[in-house]
Amino acid sequence: MKWMRVRRGILFVSFLLLPLTLFYFSPYLPVYAAISGVVAGSMLVFGILFLLGIFIGRAPCGWFMGCGGLQDACFYIQDKRIPAGRKDLIKYVIWIPWFSTIVVFLFLNREGLQVDPFFHIEGGISVARAPFFIIYYLVIFLFVLLSLIFGKRAGCHYICWMAPFMVFGRKLGNLLRLPQLRLMTRTENCIHCTICSKACPMGIDVQAGVEKGNAENSECILCGECAQKCPKNALKLGIARGQR
């Protein structure tokens, strides 16, 4: 499908832009900024991801995250599926103390708190600023290593510090029953071929969701790969109200 090629193209361009955008997705910078009494640009981005999550869930992961594009490129080397399951909770074990640290320091510095979208990002990644250049490649190495050792989208499964913002946004949207981008199912069309599950880069048992008429899953990045591969059009991306 043409829109699927567009999605992959956007992911590839996002990966190429990582040297410019990395600090806006940095897990370290908001902690350092909070200690300094500053709300950094990356914290603002995380807030935007939470708001987006209310309406489009984790679609940013599947459509325009640079590290997502990097991991998709690794599929050509390691295409092992990682089944969605309890191990996905690892990222929340990492996220809770990390985000709590940010909140605590922002609260302690609340009286003189400043908002600075450009806090410590002057010049971006540059060989003239070796520490930042090294950090960039360490991030790249970590995501590639996880993908090669464990399989598809391992970084999204286990260490992504941005995913919880979108997941919690999604849950809020479901609670409020707002119109959301979601994976729509046509159970009567399903022929139980498991092609959709095999196509899912996040290792979700999509077919089970189709069979019960609800494909909602917190690990779903709404990439649409399952819908594209389904031979009977039992799946499609569409807008519908969330379920409590």
Image (cartoon, helix red, strand yellow):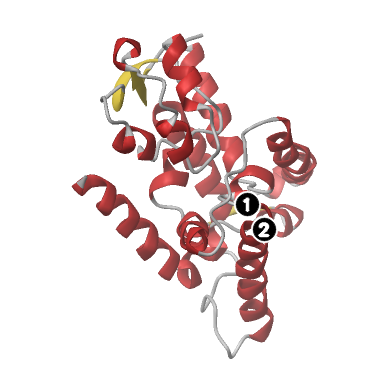
Against 236, is 38 above or below? below
3D distance between C-alphas at marks 1 and 2: 6 Å
Query: Depth check: 112 or 157 in front?
Result: 157
- Give residue 204's position: percent from left, percent from top: 54, 32
Residue at 62% across / 51% down in the picture? 155
Residue at 53% across / 40% down in the picture? 202
How many numbered markers are drawn?
Answer: 2
Against 32, is 215 above or below? above
Residue 228 visible, this orientation: yes
- Give residue 207's position: percent from left, percent from top: 46, 23
Residue at 35% across / 37% down in the picture? 224
Q: Is residue 175 left or right of residue 111?
A: left
Q: Which kind of residue does numbered mark 1 sit on?
A: Gly
Residue 132 placement: quadrant: bottom right
* Quadrant (top left, top right, bottom left, bottom right) of the N terminus: top left
Which label is found at residue 146?
2
Q: Which kind of residue does numbered mark 2 sit on?
A: Leu
Counting residues from the start of the chain, the first of labels 1 and 2 encountered is: 2
State yes or no: discs 1 and 2 in contact (Cβ < 8 Å). Answer: yes
Query: Depth check: 81 or 137 in front?
Result: 81
- Give residue 195's position: percent from left, percent from top: 41, 33
- Give residue 159's position: percent from left, percent from top: 68, 48
Which label is found at residue 155?
1
